Image: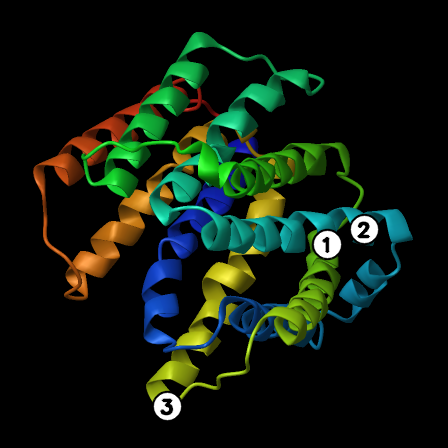
């Protein structure tokens, strides 16, 4: 598989993550950790079912415990600290801090063997961050309050965990993407435990809400993580990092098309910043034949 193709597959995860807000909104009043447990169970089952016609993939389950610890910390750790941050701090500020992870991926990638951080990678990621800030804040700015320092710290941990997981995955090329199936099941188990300790169980009310949970597990909390694993291991990780800022933009556009919200000037400006930043970061990849 070429580097460019792997990057495109990795970016498909960003496209699937754009459906996260829509499916979450459509899932009704299911609490966050319960929803995470349900959707990751579906995501793990997606990989398991694919092994029926790929019996050789069963070998992927035989991994050292360190690999499962690494993968579970990445997937569960990100979601745990993200929900903790939203509980302990205003969602706008917490969400913006948590979404530092694409920029951190670009920065941390410079530590990888064979990778070189160029000015356009960094500039593209910063443009994406600025565009995401416009989306999250609605162009109205934000104010960090010392009363919520615990929530801000959780949001920063969330960003560090996901960026670290993504970059360090590059150092584990021998671990097959099929191992993500195990990561999903372990994340579902830990999320269920967190749900029992922190939340009251609320099941979906209608068929549409159950379908939304299924959609979450199949795409943004399922296939997306398999695609992302392949992309960060074999693709251009710096381009993927900068291009990941498209997720909040696409998510907002999907919600608009579904009838939630209205188009604003700040959203148009965010679109220009994010698409321009992604194109700038990818300028070395465009036209490359590999």
Real-space Cα separation, disc 1 to disc 3, in angstroms: 30 Å
- Within the image, what quadrant is residue 204 found in? bottom left
Query: Which residue has dot 1 on it?
Result: 72
Image mark for residue 105: none
Left or right side of 284 for 189: right
Q: What residue is drawn where x is 33% and y is 74%? A: 26
Left or right side of 239 for 49: right
Applied colour scheme: rainbow
- Earlier in the chain: of badge 3 and badge 2, it is 2
Q: Nearer the viewer, residue 176 or 155?
A: 155
User: Furthest residue to the top?
Assistant: 119
Query: Which residue has dot 3 on it?
Result: 207
Q: Residues within 10 Å of mark 3 (few under 14, many from 20)?
A: few
Query: Which residue has dot 2 on it?
Result: 69
Identify the element where label 2 is drawn: helix
- Earlier in the chain: of badge 1 and badge 3, it is 1
């Amino acid at each position: 598989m070429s580097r460019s193709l792997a990057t495109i597959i990795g970016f498909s995860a960003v496209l699937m993550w754009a459906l996260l807000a829509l499916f979450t909104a459509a899932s009704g009043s299911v609490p966050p950790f319960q929803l995470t447990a349900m959707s990751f169970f579906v995501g793990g089952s997606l990989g398991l079912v694919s092994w029926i016609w790929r019996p050789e993939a069963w070998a992927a389950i035989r991994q050292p415990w360190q690999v499962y610890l690494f993968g579970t910390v990445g997937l569960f750790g990100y979601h745990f600290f993200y929900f903790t941050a939203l509980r302990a701090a205003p969602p706008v500020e917490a969400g913006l801090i948590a979404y530092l992870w694409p920029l951190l991926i670009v920065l941390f990638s410079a530590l990888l063997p064979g990778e070189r951080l160029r000015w356009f990678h960094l500039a593209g990621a910063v443009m994406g961050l600025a565009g995401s800030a416009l989306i999250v804040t609605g162009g109205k700015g934000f104010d960090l309050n010392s009363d919520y320092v615990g929530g801000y710290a959780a949001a920063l941990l969330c960003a560090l965990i996901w960026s670290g997981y993504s970059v360090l995955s590059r150092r584990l090329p021998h671990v097959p993407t099929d191992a993500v199936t195990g990561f999903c099941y372990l994340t579902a188990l830990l999320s269920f435990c967190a749900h029992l300790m922190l939340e009251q169980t609320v099941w979906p009310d209608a068929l549409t809400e159950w379908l939304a949970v299924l959609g979450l597990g199949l795409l943004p909390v399922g296939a997306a993580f398999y695609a992302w694993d392949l992309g960060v291991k074999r693709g251009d990780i710096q381009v993927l990092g900068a291009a990941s800022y498209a997720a909040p933009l696409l998510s907002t556009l999907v919600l608009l098309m579904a009838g939630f919200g209205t188009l604003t000037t700040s959203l148009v400006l965010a679109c220009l910043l994010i698409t321009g930043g992604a194109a700038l970061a990818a300028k070395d990849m465009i036209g490359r034949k590999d």
